[in-house]
Image: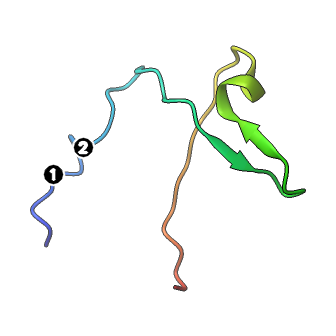
Amino acid sequence: MTGIDYRTAGPEQGAIFPDFELPNTDGEAVRLHEWRDSRRALMVFFRSASW
C-alpha cells in the first residue's frame, strides 16, 4: 500500500488539463491543446505490464 487515496488524487472533474507535447506514430511532435482545437478530449493513461 502506498497510502495515497487515489479517489481524491489528480485534477478535479472539469479542470483544464495542462498542455503537453508528445510524438505521434510518425515521430512528429503534437501539442494537446493545438491538436484538439478547442474540442473536448478524453485522456486515458495506463501502466504497461512490461517494463
Point out residue 29 in the picture as x, y percentages from the top left corner.
78, 44
Secondary element under disc 2, as helix, strand or loop, is: loop
Q: What residue would you read off at disc 1? A: 5
For the residue pair 9 and 27, the one nearer the viewer reads as: 27
Question: What colouring style does the render use?
Answer: rainbow
Q: What residue would you read off at disc 2? A: 9
Point out residue 38 in the picture as x, y percentages from the top left corner.
69, 14
User: Compared with residue 50, is residue 42 higher up or lower down, i.e. above or below?
Assistant: above
- Give the number of callouts: 2
Q: CA distance from mark 1 to mark 2?
A: 6 Å
Q: Residue furthest bottom?
A: 50
Tag of residue 45: none
Residue 42 falls in which quadrant of the image? top right
For the residue pair 22 and 7, the one nearer the viewer reads as: 22
- The amino acid sitting under disc 1 is Asp
User: Compared with residue 10, is residue 15 higher up or lower down, i.e. above or below?
Assistant: above
User: Compared with residue 46, is residue 23 higher up or lower down, i.e. above or below?
Assistant: above
Q: Residue at x 42, y 20 (%)?
A: 14
Point out residue 7 in the picture as x, y percentages from the top left corner.
23, 45
Q: Residue furthest right?
A: 26
Secondary element under disc 1, as helix, strand or loop, is: loop
Q: Quadrant of the N terminus?
A: bottom left
Q: Is residue 49 left or right of residue 34?
A: left
Q: Residue furthest left?
A: 3
The answer to whether mark 1 and mark 2 are in CB contact below 8 A is yes
Q: Is residue 16 left or right of residue 11?
A: right
Q: Residue at x 52, y 54 (%)?
A: 45
Residue 2 falls in which quadrant of the image? bottom left
Binning the other alpha carbons within 10 Å of mark 2 as few (below 14), some (14 to 19) or many (20 upward) gives few
For the residue pair 19 and 6, the one nearer the viewer reads as: 19
Point out residue 18 in the picture as x, y percentages from the top left corner.
49, 30
